[in-house]
Image (cartoon, rainbow, N blue to C red):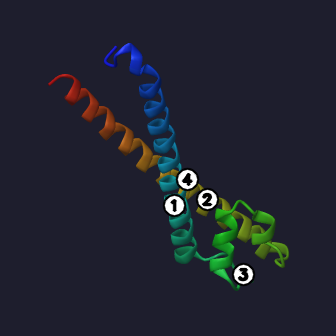
């Protein structure tokens, strides 16, 4: 162990706090990326005919509230909006996962390099 026995409680607390802070920071950043990419997709491709408020549509998708996003739409407009919602969320999620994987790769290379120096 790197820490003396009498300081193990403090070291454990610091370790747990650091881990928890990292989890929260990562979740917040990935959620922000997801929201930004969903809004960008909706801005580029819209939400179908009959949907007059793309920004509200995007906000509802990001919040996971599909019923609110498609409320007031009927027939084929509703089906198109549902498809757009699925595509927008899938795009945002894919970008968030790509960023997470790049960060994980960079972190693993950094740890490997530092452990061997």
First reached walking from the N terminus: tag 1 or tag 4: 1
At x 38%, y 39%, the residue is: 104
Residue lying furthest front:
6
First reached walking from the N terminus: tag 2 or tag 3: 3
Compared with 84, 106 (above or below) is: above
Label 2, secondary structure: give it.
Answer: helix
Label 4, secondary structure: give it.
Answer: helix
Q: CA distance from mark 2 to mark 3?
A: 17 Å
Q: CA distance from mark 1 to mark 4?
A: 11 Å
The residue mark sitting in front, 1 or 2, is 1
Compared with 41, 32 (above or below) is: above
Q: Crowding at label 4, few (<14), some or many (≥20) Cα neighbours within 10 Å? A: some
Residue lying furthest left:
117
Q: Residue 42, how many percent across, how many down?
A: 58, 72
At x 85%, y 76%, the residue is: 74
At x 51%, y 64%, the residue is: 37
**Which label sits on residue 93?**
4
Q: Residue 92, how many percent across, how many down?
A: 54, 58
**Which label sits on residue 95?**
none
**Which label sits on residue 89?**
2
At x 54%, y 77%, the residue is: 43
């Amino acid at each position: 162990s790197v820490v003396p026995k009498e300081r193990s409680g403090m070291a454990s607390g610091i370790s747990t706090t650091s881990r928890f802070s990292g989890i929260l920071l990562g979740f917040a950043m990935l959620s922000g990326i997801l929201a930004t990419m969903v809004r960008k997709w909706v801005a580029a491709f819209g939400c179908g005919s009959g949907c007059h408020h793309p920004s509200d549509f995007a906000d509802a998708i990001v919040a996971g509230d599909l019923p609110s996003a498609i409320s007031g739409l009927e027939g084929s407009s509703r089906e198109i909006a549902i498809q757009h919602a699925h595509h927008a969320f899938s795009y945002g999620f894919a970008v968030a996962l790509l960023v997470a994987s790049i960060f994980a790769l960079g972190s693993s290379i950094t740890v490997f390099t530092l452990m061997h120096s």
